[in-house]
Image (tube, rainbow, N blue to C red):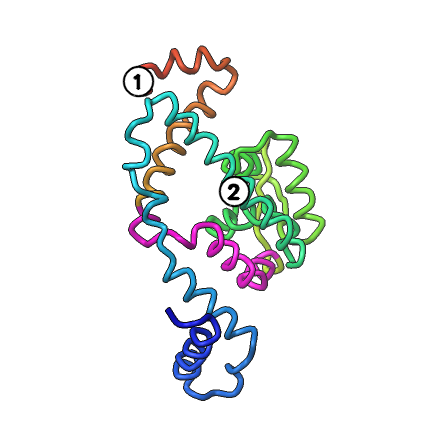
Amino acid sequence: MDSTLIQIVRHYERFKENSKGALENDNVAKFSAYLHQVALSESDYSETVSTENWQNFNRKTLLEMTTAYIGKMSRYVDNYCRKNLPKTALGNVEEFTYLIVLLEHQQLPKSELIKRNNHAITTGTDIVARLINKNFVVQFPNPVDKRSVMISITDHGKGAIFSSSETLNNLSMIGAGVLSNQELMQLIGMLQKLDTFHERIHDEHKNLDLAEIIADNKTLLQG
């Protein structure tokens, strides 16, 4: 195998070819980003996702490992967000998730917006208040239901998302960038299945204790 220096030189030659000689593209930052992409594409993570590694484990162990990994991935992403989102117009990941829902729907009842983010009313109300103070959203009476209020995203809120797009794209890339498109589709499908299951529990049975929830879902739970 060639030395690291020779490999870097060859990668730089390919980088120059891809840049078509444009001077503005010939800088260390862009070459570093190019090398990062090359490293990801050449890395072999097949063993990590091979089911053969886990075939001898019983279901109890598999469930424990799945829960542990999901929690660990969440902490990784949360750490990336805490370090990088404050550098953008968006203060934190909660403000982003509220705004992105409103970007899709334009306006929603406040209770529905909070529900879609799976927050307690008090937590969601605090987040909405911060967004109002930043002029990212506005609040107004619900013309259909006088007991509730509507939340709508402002042009300033849309601008906050668009101006933060590079950081948001980088967070998405680092979050699951080693997975192929096929693996991503499989993961999204499984996560949607889990989300549907837990959303129903949250909507219909969130006041039950764990033993009651398990008893009510006995036919759905495997093993």
Which residue is label 2 attached to?
108
- Residue at horizontal 40 percent and vertical 34 percent from the top: 195
Residue stretch in magenta: 157-185
The answer to whether residue 117 is above or below residue 209 is below
Q: In this view, does 157 lie to the left or right of 104?
A: right
> Can you tell which of label 1 and label 2 is closer to the viewer?
1
Q: Is 216 in front, or is 190? A: 190
The quadrant in which the N terminus is found is: bottom left
Among numbered discs 1 and 2, the one appearing first in the sequence: 2
Position of the C terminus by quadrant: top left
- Residue type at the position of mark 2: Leu
Name the residue rendered at 64%, 59% in the picture: 88
Q: Does the magenta stretch include residue 164?
A: yes
Spatial CA distance of label 1 from label 2 is 40 Å
Picture coordinates of residue 193 (x, y %)?
A: 34, 34
Residue appearing at x 45%, y 88% in the figure: 21
Q: Mark 2: give few (<14), some (14-19) or many (20+) Cα within 10 Å.
A: some
Tell me: 46 left or right of 125: left
Q: Where is residue 192 in the image (x, y as percent from the top left)?
A: 36, 38
The picture places residue 217, in percent across and down from the top left corner, at 36, 17
Q: Is 62 left or right of 24, judged from the image as shown?
A: left
Q: Any magenta on residue 31?
A: no
Q: Residues within 10 Å of mark 1 (few under 14, many from 20)?
A: few
Q: Mark 1 points at which residue?
A: 223
| Three-letter code for the amino acid on which mark 1 is drawn | Gly
Q: Which of 77 and 145 is in front in this view?
A: 77
Circle 1 — which element? loop
Under circle 2, the secondary element is strand
Report the residue that reaches farthest toward the right. Answer: 133
Give the overall secondary structure of the magenta segment.
Answer: helix
